[in-house]
Image (spheres, grey):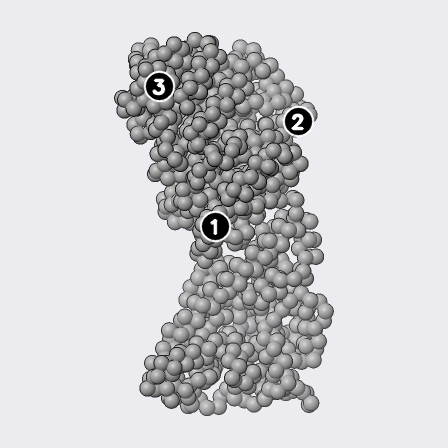
Amino acid sequence: MTASAPTGANPLQALAGAQQSPWLDFIRRSFVEDGSLAALVHAGDIRGVTSNPAIFQKAIGDGTEYDAQMRALLAKSTPTPGALYERLAITDIQAAAKVLAPVYEQTQGTDGFVSLEVSPYLARDEHGTTQEAARLWADVAAPNLMVKIPATPQSIPAIRQSIAAGINVNVTLIFSLAAYRDVVEAWLTGLEELHAKGGNLSRVASVASFFVSRIDARIDSAIDQRTSAGDAQAAALATLRGKVAIANAKLAYAYWQDIMQSPRWKVLEAAGAQTQRLLWASTGTKDKAYSDVLYVDSLIGPQTVNTLPPATMDAFRDHGTVRETLTAGLDDARHILAETQRLGLDLDSVTDALLDEGVTAFEEAFDTLLASVAAKQAALMGDSLTGLKTSLPADLSAAVTQAQDDWRRNGTIRRLWAKDATVWTGGTEADWLNWLTIVDDRAANLAELEAFQTEVRARGFTQVLLMGMGGSSLGPEVLATTFGKHEGFGHLYILDSTDPQQVAATEKKLDIAHTLFIVASKSGSTLEPSIMLSYFHDLAKRTLGAQAGAHFVAITDPGSSLEKLAQAEGFWKIFHGDPKIGGRYSVLSNFGLVPAAAAGVPLHPFVADALRGVRLCDASVPPAVNRGVQLGLILGTAARLGRDKLTILATPEIADFGAWMEQLVAESTGKNGLGIIPIDNETPGSLRHYGADRLFVYLRLAPEHRHEQDEAIATLREAGQPVLTITLHNRRQIAQEFFHWEMATAVAGAVLGIHPFDQQDVEFSKIETRRLTEAYEKTGSLPPEAPFASFGPLSFFADPANAAATQGADAVAVLKAHFARVQPSDYVALLAYLPRNRDTQEWMQHTRLHLRDGLNCATAAEFGPRFLHSTGQAYKAGPNTGVFLQITADNAQDLPIPGTSLTFGLVESAQARGDFSVLAERERRIIRVHLHGSLKEGLAALATALHDAL
Ligand SMILES: O=P(O)(O)OC[C@H]1O[C@](O)(CO)[C@@H](O)[C@@H]1O
């Protein structure tokens, strides 16, 4: 360390003579790039640099200085905003380290440091801090770096471990003598550990940053308050104004001097160790009544550092006084602290509070910084990201802002990414969170899927049939309908029904000899895919003989019964799902990617888009700009305010996304009498049909948007209905939305206080179905049932309670009585166990709109058994606001299920009956209408009756 200053030196330069190093508490890109820092260093004004989250927030958060580097980084990859910030900060730190390197060299590694702080979010996390210190040390890779670690009780062990690892540490946020003693202890122990390992002590530098002026600011304000309240001790209190912080610092210095005399230190010193210098921080004067160099002039002494904000640096250069003040007036200092205590100014509480405030202030600065980095990143990525515009009524908007702030203050998004189950119910949630990381995992292992895609193409399949339910089919269905057929690949068909006519219609589309069959089931034991597989495998065996297995691919979780069957039958491939991902969160795992590969969807760009979605929902993105969190907080908050009908409208080319969303949202949130009811694909109507229970989501595919949909949405917005408009700039961006909605659903679940990853109520219908099919296998028939009313082709069935409530002299009267039960904010759902084809879909759509317009309520048009693995969970266990019309029909054709005495038609009716009894048991308002004879005529009769009933 330089012992004397050059003659004619300014006060800053003269500090060298007093063995104090002035460091600068400031950094920003332009200041380093334009040579300003170098000029200060060369002049000898400044011998080190410190940064903190608030300094970087000012540097990066405002202005455009960092845009060029951001652009360059974003051109190469899509980092998380947190990683992007860190790259920018490290670039500055490395540049400053270079400027200070000559000082470091001249002083043999004892001065010329630049400090970079660990994430303030880790301030109370020993392990996280230790890891991050090591990571930053390695990433910056400059010997004159100091990693800043706050002196919280939790971080003290991290300080010891970092020192022991040979990392230079700047311990920050020290306010009390007690904390300082702990820091010294950690530092000494760390050095001793390093020494014991045979490490080189001479290059381990450390400073203990003792905060000064903040203490006076607090104590002075307490004094002022008491004085103005007429305190009897006002005169004595007045003598302490502006004195306590410096007295505190002087005693810290005295403690350091004692340590320097201790035998413990002497051993380390003899082994070549450097001392840990005290660094005075928070030395900008806060009270204008005091000298603007008070906290520099008064704290000068050998082997110390003072880190100065730019204004204080300039002031000290201009009129500072260099005199060894630190060691003078030690008795006075003791007296001041004794007086502080005598007069009831609780210094311990003040320093405790200052530590908490200091941590919080840096967290908040970091929140602001990351929010601006994320916003800037989004702006620079432009149309490569989907957009979100929200238009919310005042009450909802205020509640959402409040929720965002709660999430920000509590760091909930970081807890979510850290898989902390207490974000939800503290149950088994952590076992279901691998959807958070599956895209990175798949991106890193894309070669296997790409090889599969190449092989599929080479084998020249003309069709691909995917068999599965819910999460195993709805994602692939979105891919099939959104992307269509790809050159060189077969058309992807989806089968998720037990309706015999639908099975037969699917079979008709296939050329079995040239079809690739994919059976997808996470559990491997779901009824529908099992029987579909039996049917088509049997068919394939009849066409292809021993080669049949080579046409089959299974996607299932490891060890499932499906995996065993696939092995036994010689399937071509078996792809595994991740058991820590539930079905409805599986679209970006092999459950979506294998069908995507088979259909020829270009995998790399698709996964790259999904990754964009992941990055912008990252733990480092604060709630107000985190797309998934934003959406989820709106969904959850809206539901809590009674807007629980999530009404989904989409450009037709991407409209199937709604069916996937339905399952995700309904199966995740619909439980314990709570939840969000998705209303998919309900054509917009007149404003008077909408109550205060709606939240609209418009998925707008910009290049193919429909003018009339835009108009309808604008009308809703103008009428004050809450509307979320999500803009996709191309179809592939559905990959981003898959992730956004997964995150949103998890977040909405947290707002509702439910477990969003189980679906316990689905099981009840399955049990009932099983009971019925087993009865059939034993007795050859289903248990008898009788309609409570029959009129021509329409027979009505219900449990006694529902039957009693819907008596009528004709079909019209029955339906009238049933729908008279609809209250404001209820919804009506048609649950049709019919072949899902263009005719039935049109009928359902027409009928639901008729009901919507007649009853002014939200409507759903669902096909069984498909919805049983989707919205069925919410219908059974969500809010009891649904009024259901189950529709069944005679099957014009039935198909046997190989290896059983069952038929598809029988399973379908058992499923309808099973679900009915569970809904009825749960006191839902439901009746079943069975259509006899021709389906067309039955549907026409029902439509007429409904028309007359409303
Ligand atoms: O993939 P699997 O295990 O066949 O399950 C299919 C679907 O059934 C459910 O488990 C229940 O409906 C869904 O969550 C799931 O997506």
Residue type, numbered disc 3: Ala
Residue at disc 2, CB closer than 8 Å to ligand 1 = no
Looking at the image, which is closer to me, 293 or 403? 403
Is ligand 1 closer than 8 angstroms to the Cβ of mark 1?
A: no
Looking at the rendered structure, which numbered label has been put on residue 675? none
What residue did someone put label 1 on? 394
Q: Residue drawn at (63%, 22%), measured in percent from left and top?
A: 490
Where 560 sits versus 388, above or below? above
Quarter-wise, where is residue 8 in the image?
A: bottom right
Element assignment for label 2: loop
Q: Is residue 612 above or below residue 653?
A: below
- Determine crowd level at label 2: few under 14, some 14-19, many 20+ residues with C-alpha closer than 10 A: some
- The residue under label 3 is 813
Coordinates of residue 389 in the picture (x, y in percent): 57, 46
User: What residue would you read off at disc 2?
Assistant: 486
Q: Secondary structure at mark 1?
A: helix
Number of the front mark, 3 or 1: 3
Q: Residues within 10 Å of mark 3 (few under 14, many from 20)?
A: some
Tell me the element at label 3. Answer: helix
Mark 1 neighbour class, 10 Å CA radius: few under 14, some 14 to 19, many 20 or more: few
Cβ–Cβ under 8 Å for marks 3 and 1: no
Residue at image point 41% right, 70% down: 353
Given contact means CB atoms under 8 Å apart, are the residues at marks 2 and 1 in contact?
Answer: no
Residue 896, image x, y percentages:
44, 11
Distance from disc 3 to disc 1, alpha carbons, whole Å, reads 42 Å
